[in-house]
């Protein structure tokens, strides 16, 4: 199956906001022309918006509405190739948001060619409840607070309308050293490789590569044709490039508040 580059890029941008609102965890941003979620956490990762399609005349008013909606909470705003208006980044900077990171939107359209993974890494699929229980490990691996990690795990566990799969990785012991997830994009031949991180003291042993290999193999076995990822340019993107992923677009992350 041939999947157009436009379809892949649209999926890279939109899947940042794929999970629906969950009562008690996250509300819809509720501002026309932009997608996003609002939580009770003071986190620019948990409170995220983007995929904006705004006109030149309305954009500054919408930025003000978004800031009002989040109040004193920290929040993040992602811009991408479909973002409108074209000068949105400079408008965000003028409104006080700071550039906080850069992501590489990547895709791998060949799932038939396997990835060689280290035999010393064991991968086990786990339940959403197992993932929630391991939120502290996930937080330490990502370098984020455990309550933010728990939020994402609980969102995945509550998203019954979207198929997701969670994985732990192990080296020598019985305690997991890394975690990742896989999201099946509804009504699509694509999957999203969600967050994956390894504890700092266990990096350099091929754990991340093994998690990518397992998720791609599972996606292919389930009939999916391609995989997308929003990879951090400083960490996972270089690895993904070596594993056959190709960059299709860039995503810039801005944040309001300390980050």
Image (cartoon, rainbow, N blue to C red):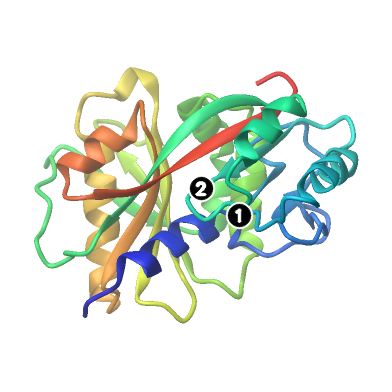
Q: Is residue 246 left or right of residue 73?
A: left
For residue 176, say whether it is visible.
no
Q: Is residue 51 above or below residue 94?
A: below
Residue 102, position as x, y percentages in the image: 46, 32
Identity of the residue drawn at 21% across and 80% down: 1
The front one of 225 and 87 is 87
- Return the residue at label 1: 51
**Above or below, 71 relative to 257:** below
Vertical comparison of 62 with 235: above or below: below
Residue 125 spot, x, y in % from top left: 37, 57
Q: Nearer the viewer, residue 117 or 226?
A: 226
* Residue 91 appears in the picture as rendered: yes
**Picture quadrant of residue 202:** top left
User: Residue at 17% across / 46% down in the picture?
Assistant: 243
Could you tell me which quadrant the C terminus lies in?
top right
Q: Is residue 105 above or below residue 232?
A: below
Q: How packed is label 1: few (under 14 Cα within 10 Å), some, or many (20 or more)? A: many
**Residue 231 percent coordinates (x, y):** 38, 41
Q: Please report contact status of discs 1 and 2: CB closer than 8 Å, yes or no.
A: yes
Query: Residue 95 got which mark?
Result: none
Q: Nearer the viewer, residue 15 or 61?
A: 61
Question: Would you identify the image quadrant in which residue 214 lies?
Answer: bottom left
Q: Position of residue 45 (x, y in %)?
A: 63, 37
The answer to which of marks 1 and 2 sits earlier in the sequence is: 1
**Residue at mark 1 to residue at mark 2: CA–CA distance:** 7 Å
Q: Give the residue drawn at x 62%, y 66%.
A: 159
Q: Secondary structure at mark 2?
A: loop
Front residue of 27/51: it is 51
How packed mark 2 is, by other alpha carbons closer than 10 Å (few <14, some 14-19, many 20 or more), is many
| Residue identifier under label 2 | 80
Query: Relative to 38, is 255 on the left or the right?
Result: left
């Amino acid at each position: 199956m041939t999947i157009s580059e436009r379809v892949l890029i649209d999926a890279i941008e939109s899947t940042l906001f794929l999970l629906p609102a969950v009562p008690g965890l996250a509300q819809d941003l509720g501002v026309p022309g932009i997608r996003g979620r609002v939580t009770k956490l003071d986190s620019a990762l948990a409170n995220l918006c983007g995929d904006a399609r705004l006109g030149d005349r309305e954009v500054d008013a919408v930025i003000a509405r978004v800031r009002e909606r989040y109040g004193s909470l920290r929040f993040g705003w992602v811009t991408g190739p479909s973002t409108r208006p074209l000068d949105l980044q400079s408008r965000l900077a003028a409104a006080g948001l700071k550039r906080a990171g850069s992501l590489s939107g990547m895709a791998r359209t060949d799932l038939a060619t396997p990835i060689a993974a280290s035999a010393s890494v064991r991968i086990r699929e786990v339940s959403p409840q197992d993932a929630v229980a391991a939120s502290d490990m996930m937080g330490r691996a990502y370098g984020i607070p455990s309550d933010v990690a728990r939020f994402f795990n609980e969102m995945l566990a509550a998203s019954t309308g979207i198929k997701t799969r969670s994985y732990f990785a192990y080296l020598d012991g019985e305690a997991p050293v890394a975690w990742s997830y896989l999201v099946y994009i509804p009504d699509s031949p694509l999957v999203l490789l969600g967050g994956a991180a390894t504890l700092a003291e266990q990096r350099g042993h091929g754990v991340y590569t093994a998690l990518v290999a397992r998720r791609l193999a599972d996606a292919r076995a389930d009939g999916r044709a391609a995989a997308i990822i929003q990879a951090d340019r400083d960490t996972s993107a270089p690895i993904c490039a070596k594993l056959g992923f190709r960059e299709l677009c860039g995503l810039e992350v801005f944040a309001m508040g300390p980050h």
